[in-house]
């Protein structure tokens, strides 16, 4: 009950007029930063962090939380409207969000994303409040073998889903994994795959560069071709009736959303995993369990709701290892961690005991920020949808400029901008030949984690491969990934058998 | 279409060989002493899988007797696509020398006026408005400096004003 | 109009502050005319990054620079990317770099065409310390227990640390040489990751910086065995130094700033004064005391001499590990 008292205190501070103003400001700024291809919460937090030493810490926390949430909501906006995932966590949102926008249902998709994010945020804050302390121990049990098994699981949920050409999907996964090894080999400390001796490759190929290249530039080239440079666009408008319809639709999805939230929270809580595998696994699970699973990838509203609940829940979950173990799960949490250190807080198991007002203040700030983000987001949906009604030749020019600048911004290297153009042209050619892009991009995100944990395990176990199966947690995950991998195979076999019997019957 | 499919598969095979060549600079086998695969193992064997699968796509295209489903490039729009790509390359090539604030407006000017055939009013609004937005948003607000090239001295008074 | 007035007041205020703190540099002959890039030789979130961002916020809070200092991470290739960037920007006055020990080791291990002798030294802010840690649940209480346990394991003792060839692996090599033991070195991507895996029992020991293990130490989950410092660290008064135990093992992580070759002397003076003021700020003093950092300010020629001496030491260390040129 003491806990509820802390939470109430936190809410009291976060709801004061000045803090409410800060929240609205932060959320709006975060939304726009997140909606820019290439920029995300990390940019917003990096800018605001030094300012937090000037304002009182309680306002500082709430401003950071507001930007964090605002940018997360914003990421979904660029995924849906432009088809460019602003962060790796939003890749799964493009699977169905983009098709919906192309069918003129951008408004509905945005409503779905906003409501789903809100539900995910709410459920995860409740889970956090109830179970924060005991769950820290679960995170500790995660060593390299468990990390490997979890990434494997994330991969199989995704691979099993692909309706695309199997050979081409495998090629794209391997290409993504191979590209992820560019740069420095952590284990031996040696540089590798430094193409043409360009120093830019020392830092590897970042997700944003590949995503902006393939989804941004590549997609625009593809649209220029298919639209035959006619300036017509899909009519997109939003009315109050649509809003009401959207909420009614979302009301039916409570099961998908609660699954997504719980899964997102638990996967996000594990150190090193984070929101990307969480969103993927939630999408996979939703597709497997949904009655209209065949519609996934063609603009199913559940396909937007599931990953959006999960990635929002996961970002709350990922605060847990940061606070209790001092392990940042993402660049943004790394910055927040740096901020905590500067405020004189020591992250660790004692933080919850010694600094309860900070911890619960942060949680209640997150909740307030989440509420503010959904309201601001819903209010701004007409503005975002209106942007889609620009003539195509204007929209393309602006998006191309944003791709170039957004690609330059994170590491400030022209090298990355050249890569974006290269990936854009390459992605365009590959997409025309029916090579799927999502496995490429996701493999690049998950690849480094997979290789690192695999090799760390083998080094510490003196090369014993059985180590992955012998440990209970990693063994379970591996068993699950085998099931996930085989399930679609079994399904298609059953379907094949059934169609064969129906095909055979009339002949007899 | 079939020809393009074959060409892309062959290109992927060539790319994977290039990757394998790079990766083999580091040990690609199982390291007895330290346990586990060497530093080059992941990129090497992954590229090997790409090689095999792309080979599979190539073989499949010869084995199948599917009719050629239209041409890979749309001859009507191939020109527009390549023009945009060339414009992008020129834009990025100008940046180190002329800076982003010359290259990007030039791109917009070309895209809107010549490629998009829009009127002067819209073109000029966007060509002038975009750099101002970029400066205010990226440099002043987010403190991310864009490359300036030759135009560097022109920004000194602006920095003195805004920071 | 209002703008002009506030600006004048700001200048006057800055001048007064300058007079009061009596900055050692004779007047401000040179001030940056645009924001200053602060390249960080490591990725986001590591110890070096956190410290660099701490400096940035103190500079901003205390108004130590007329233009903003903008941190940019160029951690690729253990800092190879940052070193090349510095080398390519010869004579640039608006660029400084936050360094760590990879400043020496990276050019020694791979040929990237960079000679650190050419760079302009600015200021050394601190020396970070190293401590040998074990999980508090283990029976190991002393260094002798530790050596005995490692020997008994027959080479399967798991020592966690940052990437191979980086500081933790060098300290581990020093340990192995000194005691004639051999361990299995498991590289992780950051010090925080190492500490967590030690608490979770996935590795057996680590040589974390105190700041990375402090939270767990205070919670009683990690136990310090010995410090790689000449004197006891004030935050761990009960932990003996290696020297006390009869082993001459000392290793530091330096936290310094350098600038490109041929930076204008006025600019060097400006940045040196900025960091000197920073080193006297209250925030920095508290931080170093809490985090068991040795604030050891050094500039100019002396700093360059220190760099070259350290580089020679690291060359020997790497050679003893059977690596490097």
Image (cartoon, coloured by chain):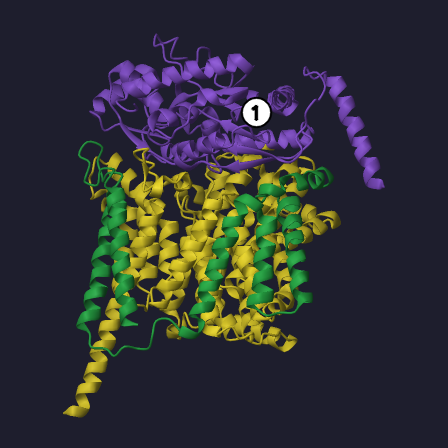
Chain colours: A yellow, B green, C purple
Whether residue A6 appears in this view of the structure is: no
Q: Nearer the viewer, residue B51 or B132?
A: B132
Q: Tell me: residue A343, above or below residue C252.
A: below
**Dividing the picture into quarters, in which one does residue B2 lie?**
bottom left
The residue lying at 27 percent from left, 46 percent from top is B43
Q: Which of B142 and A77 is in front in this view?
A: B142
Q: Is residue C93 left or right of residue B75?
A: right
Q: Residue furthest left?
A: A508
Quadrant location of the C terminus of chain C in the rendered image: top left
- Residue marked by disc 1: C263
The residue lying at 34 percent from left, 16 percent from top is C142
Quadrant location of the N terminus of chain C in the rendered image: top right
The residue lying at 41 percent from left, 40 percent from top is A203
Q: Nearer the viewer, residue A307 or A126?
A: A307
Where residue B105 appears, x then y in whole percent?
61, 55
Where residue B120 appears, x then y in whole percent?
67, 66
Where residue A13 appears, x then y in whole percent?
69, 45
Q: How crowded is mark 1: few (under 14 residues within 10 Å), some or many (20 or more)?
A: some
Q: Tell me: residue B50, above or below residue B7.
A: above
Q: Is residue A423 left or right of residue A79?
A: left
**Dividing the picture into quarters, in which one does residue C93 lie?**
top right
Tag 1, which chain? C
Q: Tell me: residue B54, above or below residue C118.
A: below
Whether residue B149 appears in this view of the structure is: yes
Where residue B31 appears, x then y in whole percent?
19, 36
**Dividing the picture into quarters, in which one does residue C315 lie?**
top left
Question: Circle 1 — which element?
Answer: loop
């Amino acid at each position: 009950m003491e806990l509820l008292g802390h939470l109430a205190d936190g809410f009291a501070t976060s709801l004061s007029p000045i803090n409410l103003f800060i929240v609205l400001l932060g959320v709006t700024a975060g939304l726009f930063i997140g909606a820019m291809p290439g920029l995300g919460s990390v940019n917003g937090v990096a800018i605001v962090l030094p300012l937090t030493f000037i304002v009182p810490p309680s306002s500082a926390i709430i401003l950071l939380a507001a930007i964090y949430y605002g940018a997360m909501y914003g990421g979904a906006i660029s995924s849906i409207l432009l088809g460019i995932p602003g962060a790796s966590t939003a890749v799964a949102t493009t699977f169905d969000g983009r098709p919906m926008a192309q069918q003129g249902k951008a408004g509905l998709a945005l409503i779905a994303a906003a409501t789903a994010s809100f539900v995910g945020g709410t459920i995860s804050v409740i889970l956090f409040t109830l179970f924060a302390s005991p769950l820290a121990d679960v995170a500790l049990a995660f060593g390299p073998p468990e990390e490997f098994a979890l990434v494997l699981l994330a991969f199989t949920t995704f691979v099993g889903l692909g309706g695309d050409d199997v050979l081409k999907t495998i090629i794209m996964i391997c290409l993504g994994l191979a590209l992820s090894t560019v740069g420095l080999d952590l284990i031996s400390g040696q540089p590798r795959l430094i193409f043409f001796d360009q120093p830019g490759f020392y830092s590897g190929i970042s997700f944003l560069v590949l995503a902006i290249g393939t989804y941004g530039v590549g997609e625009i080239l593809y649209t220029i071709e298919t639209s035959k440079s006619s300036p017509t666009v899909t009519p997109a408008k939003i009315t109050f009736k649509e809003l009401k319809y959207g909420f009614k639709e979302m009301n039916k999805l409570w099961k998908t959303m609660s699954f997504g939230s719980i899964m997102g929270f638990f996967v996000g809580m594990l150190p090193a995993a984070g929101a990307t595998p969480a969103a993927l696994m939630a999408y996979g699970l939703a597709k497997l369990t949904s009655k209209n699973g065949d519609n996934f990838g063609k603009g199913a509203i559940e396909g937007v709701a599931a990953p959006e609940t999960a990635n929002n829940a996961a970002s709350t979950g990922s605060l847990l290892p940061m606070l209790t173990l001092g392990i940042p799960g993402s660049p943004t949490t790394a910055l927040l961690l740096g901020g905590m250190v500067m405020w004189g807080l020591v992250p660790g198991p004692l933080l919850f005991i010694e600094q309860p007002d900070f911890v619960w203040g942060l949680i209640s700030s997150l909740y307030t920020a989440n509420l503010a983000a959904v309201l601001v987001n819903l209010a701004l949906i007409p503005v975002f949808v209106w942007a889609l009604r620009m003539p195509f030749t204007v929209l393309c020019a602006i998006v191309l400029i944003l791709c170039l600048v957004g690609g330059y911004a994170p590491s400030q290297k022209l090298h990355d901008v050249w890569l974006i153009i290269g990936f854009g042209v390459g992605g365009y050619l590959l997409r025309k030949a029916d090579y799927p892009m999502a496995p490429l991009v996701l493999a690049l995100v998950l690849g480094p984690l997979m290789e690192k944990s695999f090799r760390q395990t083998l080094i510490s176990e003196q090369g014993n491969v059985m180590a992955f199966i012998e440990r209970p947690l990693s063994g379970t995950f591996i068993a699950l990934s085998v099931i996930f991998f085989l399930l679609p195979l079994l399904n298609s076999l059953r379907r094949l058998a059934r169609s064969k019997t129906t095909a055979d019957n009339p002949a007899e | 279409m079939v020809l393009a499919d074959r060409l892309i598969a062959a290109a992927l095979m060539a790319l994977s060989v290039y990757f394998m060549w790079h990766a083999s600079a580091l040990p690609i086998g199982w390291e007895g002493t330290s346990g586990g695969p060497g530093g080059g193992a992941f990129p090497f064997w992954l590229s090997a899988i790409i090689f095999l699968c792309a080979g599979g796509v190539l073989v499949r295209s010869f084995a199948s007797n599917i009719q050629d489903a239209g041409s890979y490039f749309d001859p009507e729009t191939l020109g527009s696509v390549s023009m945009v790509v060339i414009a992008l390359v020129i834009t990025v090539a100008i940046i180190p020398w002329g800076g982003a604030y010359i290259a990007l407006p030039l791109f917009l000017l070309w895209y809107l006026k010549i490629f998009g055939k829009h009127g002067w009013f819209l073109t000029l609004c966007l060509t002038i408005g975009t750099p101002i937005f970029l400066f205010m948003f990226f440099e002043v607000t987010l403190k991310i400096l864009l490359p300036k090239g030759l135009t560097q001295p022109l920004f000194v008074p602006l920095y003195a004003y805004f920071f | 109009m209002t703008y002009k007035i506030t600006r004048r007041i700001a200048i006057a205020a800055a001048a007064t502050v300058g007079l009061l703190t009596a900055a050692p540099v004779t007047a401000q002959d040179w001030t940056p005319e645009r924001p200053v890039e602060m390249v960080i030789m490591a990725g986001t979130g590591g110890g070096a990054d956190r410290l660099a961002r701490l400096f940035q916020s103190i500079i901003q809070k205390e108004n130590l620079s007329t233009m903003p200092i903008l941190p940019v991470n160029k951690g690729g290739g253990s800092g190879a990317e940052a070193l090349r960037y510095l080398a390519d920007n010869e004579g640039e006055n608006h660029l400084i770099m936050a360094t760590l020990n990879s400043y020496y080791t990276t050019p020694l291990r791979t040929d990237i065409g960079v000679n650190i002798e050419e760079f302009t030294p600015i200021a050394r802010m601190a020396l970070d310390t190293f401590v040998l840690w074990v999980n508090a649940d283990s029976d190991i209480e002393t260094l002798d227990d530790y050596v005995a346990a490692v020997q008994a394991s027959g080479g399967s003792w798991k020592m966690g640390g940052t990437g191979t060839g980086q500081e933790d692996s060098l300290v581990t090599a020093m340990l192995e040489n000194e005691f004639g033991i051999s361990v299995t070195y498991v590289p992780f991507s950051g010090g925080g990751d190492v500490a967590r895996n030690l608490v979770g029992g996935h590795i057996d020991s680590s040589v974390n910086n105190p700041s990375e293990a402090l939270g767990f130490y205070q919670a009683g989950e990690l136990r310090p065995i010995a410090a790689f410092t000449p004197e006891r660290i004030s935050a761990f008064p009960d932990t003996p130094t290696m020297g006390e135990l009869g082993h001459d093992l000392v290793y530091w992580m330096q936290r310094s700033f350098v600038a490109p070759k041929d930076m204008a002397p006025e600019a060097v003076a400006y940045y040196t004064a900025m960091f000197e003021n920073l080193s006297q700020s209250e925030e920095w003093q508290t931080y170093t005391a809490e985090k068991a950092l040795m604030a050891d300010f050094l500039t100019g020629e002396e700093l360059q001499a220190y760099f070259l001496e350290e580089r020679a030491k690291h060359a020997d260390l790497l050679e003893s590990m059977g690596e490097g040129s």
